[in-house]
């Protein structure tokens, strides 16, 4: 059996951010409304991951916590291949199913049912394989006749239901997920957690980014605390949560 394995060696990721060089909101809005060109655009670099060195092994259940903007989602996007490191080396062995950007694969003009096929193809399924999953997916979403309505008319919670269910209809070796249920209602979140449980049990490696410290504690065996693009603490869930809550990185 192939072992699931991830290794970061001096990995950096820098975003290029183009900013309108307007320094107040009113000027910015007027420029937008009148189509007036801003005086100039400046390019700023945001170092979202700084020199990351870490290995995740088969059986690891990793939690990633930290403040807004610390680089957690970027870390998952790099692992999932959505972004390439700006420098350094990343090795990922094992197939990975990121549950990240909800609905990133949706075409809003297509119906829910058509999007099941569209997403299925993108995940590498054949038409026949998707047909076998189609009813189960539709049933789980409880979207009823909305399944044949274009996705652009969905509420955000309805889109979450569909995207989550499609993404969890395959069983990956490496399961990586970022806060993704935020728009779901309580009934769906409970149901979704049960569905996740079986995927989590089967996954060879689990990586979770969340602000829900209770969930991190219940699912993970090792937790990383991110701060300003770096891993500033690694420990058991209890140790890491204590470090984060008491803002150990400020001390
Ligand atoms: N597509 C992007 N283009 C430019 N900058 C980005 C982009 N995505 C993220 N950033 C920047 O990179 C940094 C890290 O962002 P990231 O989304 O990884 O943080 P996070 O830890 O997931 O935060 P949160 O808890 O708010 O989800 C932030 O400074 C953010 O502004
Ligand atoms: Mg994030």
Image: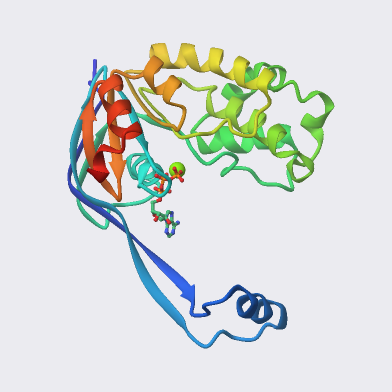
Residue 94 in view in this figure: no
Residue at x 24% of width, y 20% of height: 58
Comparing 74 with 115, the one in front is 74
Residue 241 vertical position relative to residue 30 in the rendered view, above or below: above
Coloration of the structure image: rainbow
Where residue 233 sits: x, y (%)?
A: 22, 35
Q: Residue furthest right?
A: 145
Residue 148 picture quarter: top right
Going by the image, does 226 lie left or right of 129?
left
Residue at x 37% of width, y 51% of height: 83
Residue 86 in view in this figure: yes
Residue at x 50% of width, y 18% of height: 196
The quarter of the rendered structure image containing the N terminus is top left
Where residue 216 sits: x, y (%)?
A: 39, 23
Where residue 221 sits: x, y (%)?
A: 29, 18
Residue 137 vertical position relative to residue 51 in the rendered view, above or below: above
Where residue 30 sits: x, y (%)?
A: 68, 80
Residue at x 54% of width, y 22% of height: 169
The quarter of the rendered structure image containing the C terminus is top left
| Ligand 2's quadrant | top left
Comparing 241 with 128, the one in front is 241
Residue 226 picture quarter: top left
Comparing 172 with 201, the one in front is 201
How many discs appear?
0
């Amino acid at each position: 059996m192939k072992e699931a394995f991830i290794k970061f060696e001096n990995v950096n990721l820098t975003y290029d951010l183009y900013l309108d060089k307007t320094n107040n909101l009113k000027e910015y809005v007027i420029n937008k409304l009148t189509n007036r060109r801003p005086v100039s655009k400046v390019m700023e670099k945001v170092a979202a991951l700084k020199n990351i060195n870490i290995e995740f092994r088969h059986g690891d259940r990793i939690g990633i916590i930290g403040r807004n903007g610390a680089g957690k989602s970027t870390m998952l996007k790099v692992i999932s291949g959505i972004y390439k490191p700006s420098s350094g080396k990343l090795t990922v062995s094992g197939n990975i199913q990121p549950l990240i950007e909800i609905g990133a694969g949706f075409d809003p003009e297509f119906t829910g049912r058509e999007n099941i096929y569209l997403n299925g193809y993108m995940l590498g399924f054949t038409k026949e394989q998707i047909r076998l999953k189609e009813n189960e997916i539709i049933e789980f979403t409880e979207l009823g006749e909305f399944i044949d309505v274009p996705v652009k008319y969905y509420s955000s919670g309805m889109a979450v239901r569909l995207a989550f269910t499609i993404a969890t209809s395959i069983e990956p070796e490496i399961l990586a997920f970022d806060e993704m249920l935020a728009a779901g209602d309580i009934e769906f979140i409970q149901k979704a957690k049960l569905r996740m449980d079986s995927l989590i049990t089967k996954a060879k490696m689990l990586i979770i980014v969340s602000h829900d410290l209770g969930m991190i504690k219940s699912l993970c065996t090792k937790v990383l605390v991110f701060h300003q693009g770096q891993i500033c603490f690694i420990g058991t869930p209890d140790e890491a949560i204590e470090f984060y809550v008491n803002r150990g990185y400020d001390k």
